[in-house]
Amino acid sequence: MIKMIKNINASLLVVLFWFVCAILGTFISLNENDIFLNKILEGPSWENWCGYDHLGRSICERIILGARTSLCVAFVVVLISFIVGTILGVVGAWCGGIYDKLLVILIDIFMAFPGILLAIALAGLLGPGILNTVIALSIVSWVGFSRLARVQTLSIKNRDHIIAAHALGTLEYRITLKHVLPLIMAPLIIEGTISFASVIIAEASLSFLGLGIQPPAASWGSMIKDGSQYMLVAPHMVLGPGFAILSLVLCINFFGDNLRSKLDIMESK
Amino acid sequence: MNFDYLIKRFFSAVFVLFSILTFVFFLIHIVPGDPIEVMLGESARVADRYALRESLGLNLSITQQWLNYLNNFLHFDLGKSLYSNQLVIELLFKHIPDTFLLSLASLFVAILIAVPLGIFSAVYKGSILDKASILLATLGISIPNFVMGPLLILIFSLWLGWFPVSGNDEISSIILPALTLGSALAAILSRMIRSSMLETLQQDYIRSARARGITEFNIIVFHALRNAALPVVTVLGMQFGALLAGAVITETVFSWPGIGQLMIESIQKRDYPVVQGCVLLISFTYVLVNLITDFICILIDPRIHDKND
C-alpha cells in the first residue's frame, strides 16, 4: 500500500483536484442558482472561465457543485455495493451449499440485464431524485463486487493458514474477518475504483435523461442535457461539464489500471 | 461436439429468461404508492381508476397477476399502451428495425476501428503507436455517449455541416449515432484484439510459418488473426448488451426513433406497460445474443467444452 501511495501520478492529482473542488463546494458558499439576466448564454471570459448558461447562472460554480453531487452519489453507491456485495459473496463462498447456489442464481439474473438499462428502468419507475438514483445504482452495482468476492474467497478457502486456523479452533466469523477479508481486499479495491468511474457515468446518464438529480440542483448530466439545446449559440454549456466528467472518469480509469498493474506485479513477485 | 454442454447452456438461458420475465412483472409493483394514481394523476375519476385497475389486472391477487402475465407473454400479449392504446408488441415491432440498424452500424464502426488498431499495437508492441492506441482506448471507454454525441454534433453537424443533427431521414444521419455508440466498444475490442494477438503471435505455428518464408502480412492476417478472433467473439457477444443499453442514451441524443427513445418517452409519460415491454425486449435480446455467442464459440473452437466440463 505504501508503494502505491509513493507512486502519485498525474491522474491521481486530477482526481484529487475534483475531490477538493467537491469538498470546497460544500464549505464555501457558492451561488450556483444566482441568475444574472444580463449574462444569459455569455461565453467564457477572464471573469468567468466557463461562461453562463441559458438562465444566466455561472457554469463554473455549477460544475464545482456538480462535482460534489457526482462524487457524493458515486461514493455512497460504491460503499453500499462494496459492503453488501462483499458480505454476500464471502458468506456464499464460505458457507457453500444452497446459499451459494441461490447467490449464483441471483448474480446470473442480475448479470443478464445490461447494467445501465436496469438502472434507467428502476430510476424511471421509482421517480427522479438523489435517493432513488442511489437506490437504483446500488441495486445494479453490488453484483460485480459479490461475484469477485465469491471467486476470490473460493480460491483461498483451502489455503494452509485457513486450515490451520480451523484446526486451532478459531471461530468462523473470526477466520473470515482476520484471514480471508484482508487477502481478498486488493482486487475488491481495484473493482471499487473501476466501479466508481462507471457509477459517475451512470449517475450523469440518469440525470441527462431527466431521471436522476432534479433541477435546480447542479449535476453534470443535467447541465449537458440543458446545454445540448443551445449548442449552436452556446457550445460552452456542453463543453464545460463534458470536459469535467471526461477528465474525472478518464483519470479514475488510468488510476485503476495503474493500481491493477502494480498489484499484478506484486502478486507475480 | 458436446451436446450435454449445449443443452445445459440452453436450459440455463431459459431459466434466466424466466427470471427476467418475473422481475419485469414485479417492476410495476415497485412504483411508490398506487401505480394507478401515478399513471392517471390524483384528480382522476374513481370510475377511470377502477377501469384501469381492472384492465391491468391489478385488482387480482399477486399470484394470479403473475400467472396471467406469464400466460399473456406466451401469447405474445404484453398489454396496451396507456397513452396511445396501441398494443405494446406492435409499438416494439415498429421501433425494433431502427435500433437494430443502429446497433449493427455501431458494431461495424467498432470492428472497423478496433481490428486495425488492435493488430498494429500488437505487432508494434511498445511503440508510440501502441501507447497512443492505449490512450485512445481508455479515452473511448471514459467518454460517455451523452458527451461524445453532442461533441460530434457540434463539430460535424454545426461547424462543418457534413451530417444532419438528428433524426433518421437521410442515410448519412446514421453515421454520427453509430460513431457515438461504437466508440466504447471499439476501445474495448481493440484492447482485446491486442492482447489476443500478442498471445497468438508467440505460438509455435507462427514461428513455423515464418520459417516457411510466408510473408509477415499473410502470417498476421491468415494465421494469427483467425486464431486470435475467438476471445474477441466472446467479448463482442458480452458487449452487445452494453451496446443495446447505450442505444437508449444515444437514441435520445440524436432523436433516433428506436426502442431506447420509446423507453425514455414512455417513462416520462408513465406508460408502464411500454416500459416493461422495452426492458423485456432489450434484456431478452441480450441473453439470446450471449447464448448464440456461446454456440458460435463452440463451433469455432471445439476445445471449449472441455474447459467447461
Image (cartoon, rainbow, N blue to C red):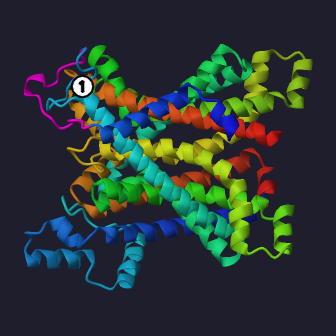
SS of the residue under disc 1: loop
Disc 1 residue crowd, few under 14, some 14–19, many 20+, Cα 10 Å: some
Residue A101 at x, y = what percent?
Answer: 65, 72
Vertical placement of residue B30 versus A122, above or below: below
- Judging by the rendered image, the residue that carries numbered circle 1 is A231
Q: Is residue B204 magenta?
A: no
> The disc numbered 1 marks a residue on which chain?
A
For residue A170, which quarter of the picture?
bottom right
The segment highlighted magenta reads A29-45
Nearer the observer, B46 or A124 = A124
Residue B42 at x, y = what percent?
Answer: 11, 69
What residue is at 11 percent from the left and 28 percent from the top? A36
Nearer the observer, A123 or B183 = A123
Q: Amino acid at mark 1?
A: Met
Nearer the observer, A207 or A50 = A50
Q: Quadrant of the N terminus of chain A?
A: top right
Residue B244 at x, y = what percent?
Answer: 45, 46
Residue B7 seen from this side: no
Nearer the observer, B90 or A86 = A86
Residue B196 seen from this side: yes
Does residue A226 appear to the left or right of B70 in the view shown? left
Q: Quadrant of the C terminus of chain A?
A: top right
Residue A228 at x, y = what percent?
Answer: 26, 31
Does residue B48 appear to the left or right of B109 in the view shown? left
